[in-house]
Amino acid sequence: MLQVTHVSKKFKDADVLKDVSLTVKPGELIHIVGINGSGKSTLFKIITGLLKADSGTVSLDSGDVIGALIENPGFLEYETAWDNLRFLANVHHKFQADKVKKLLTDFDLDPNSRQAIGKYSIGMRQKVGIVQAIMEDQNIILLDEPTRGIDKKGVKQFVDLLERLKAEGKAVVVASHDDIPGLVYDRTLTLENGELK
Ligand SMILES: Nc1ncnc2c1ncn2[C@@H]1O[C@H](COP(=O)(O)OP(=O)(O)OP(=O)(O)O)[C@@H](O)[C@H]1O
């Protein structure tokens, strides 16, 4: 279980997050809606430890592992999607080839492609970014504008994927500025003027 308690963050004089609290339980699918610049990425960066909050806490249960797609996923541009995913998972000694193959194929990406990821379209990169956020059986998954650049068929595949994750008891938080067609959430919260309600 993820618990964000009274988190605040300022950049210079701007209050980006003001006393934000959020609890995410296993199997929950949560939507955080907010316009560009409302602080969605900042919140995810604080949850993952990339940024430090000015005050407040983030806590996880023992055994919780966070997977995240934040902003534009960074990859080794001259390497293939497969080699990028293998590299990332090997950092944790957890590369599951069969699983990665299935996740890529489910998104109409070719696991055997020799194309460098630098030549992928934005939507294709997003798909690989989503795969890296879940391929190690992470149980708390944070996805920032996950469907950016993804076509209609890919969005449907994404919705199916989230339903499967939910059925497996994974918690997913999707941050986006608009609705993702077909996606039904357990809860929708709005991030506005630094407040999450
Ligand atoms: N490192 C930083 N230093 C200064 N200001 C920052 C920094 N990171 C973010 N900001 C500012 O904080 C605000 C929130 O940014 P953030 O990226 O969290 O918004 P967002 O909701 O994710 O936006 P988008 O939907 O455009 O990705 C913005 O005004 C941004 O300019």
Image (cartoon, rainbow, N blue to C red):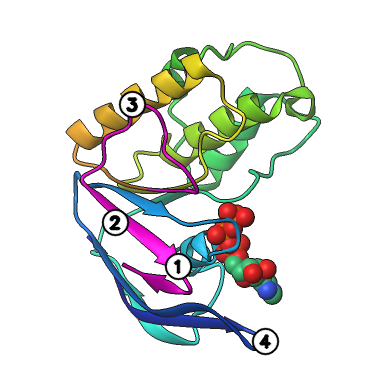
Mark toward the start of the polypeptide (1 vs 4): 4
* Label 4, label 2: how far apart the Cα atoms are: 33 Å
Q: Dividing the picture into quarters, in which one does residue 47 lie?
A: bottom left
- Ligand number 1: quarter of image: bottom right
Cα gap from disc 1 to disc 4, whole angstroms: 18 Å
Q: Which residue is mark 1?
A: 192
How many residues crowd mark 1 within 10 Å: few (<14), some (14–19), many (20+)? Answer: some
Is residue 151 left or right of 47 when viewed as pictured?
A: right
Which label was assigned to residue 64? 2
- Tell me the quarter of the picture where residue 79 sits: top right
User: Magenta segment range?
Assistant: 174-197
Q: SS class of the residue under badge 3? A: loop
Residue type at numbered disc 2: Asp
Instruction: Please tell me which residue lies in front, 129 or 176.
Output: 176
Q: Which residue is mark 4?
A: 12
Q: Is residue 166 magenta?
A: no
Which dot, 4 or 3, sits closer to the camera? 3
**What separation in Å lies between label 3 and label 1 (alpha carbons)?**
24 Å
Residue drawn at the location 46% of the way across and 23% of the way down: 155
Where does the image place residue 101, in percent across and percent down from the top left?
A: 48, 17
How far from the left and from the top, in percent, is residue 53? 49, 80
Q: Is residue 85 above or below residue 52?
A: above
- Residue depicted at 78% across the width and 30% down the height: 118
Of badges 1 and 4, the one in the foreground is 1
Q: Mark 4: which secondary structure?
A: loop
Task: Please report contact status of discs 2 and 1: CB closer than 8 Å, yes or no.
Answer: no
Residue count near mark 3 (Cα–Cα under 10 Å), binned few <14, some 14–19, many ≥20:
few
Place of residue 35 in the rendered image (x, y in percent of width and height, measured from the top left)? 53, 56
- Which comes before the other along the chain, label 4 or label 3? 4
List the residue tagged with mark 3. Answer: 182
- Amino acid marked by disc 4: Lys
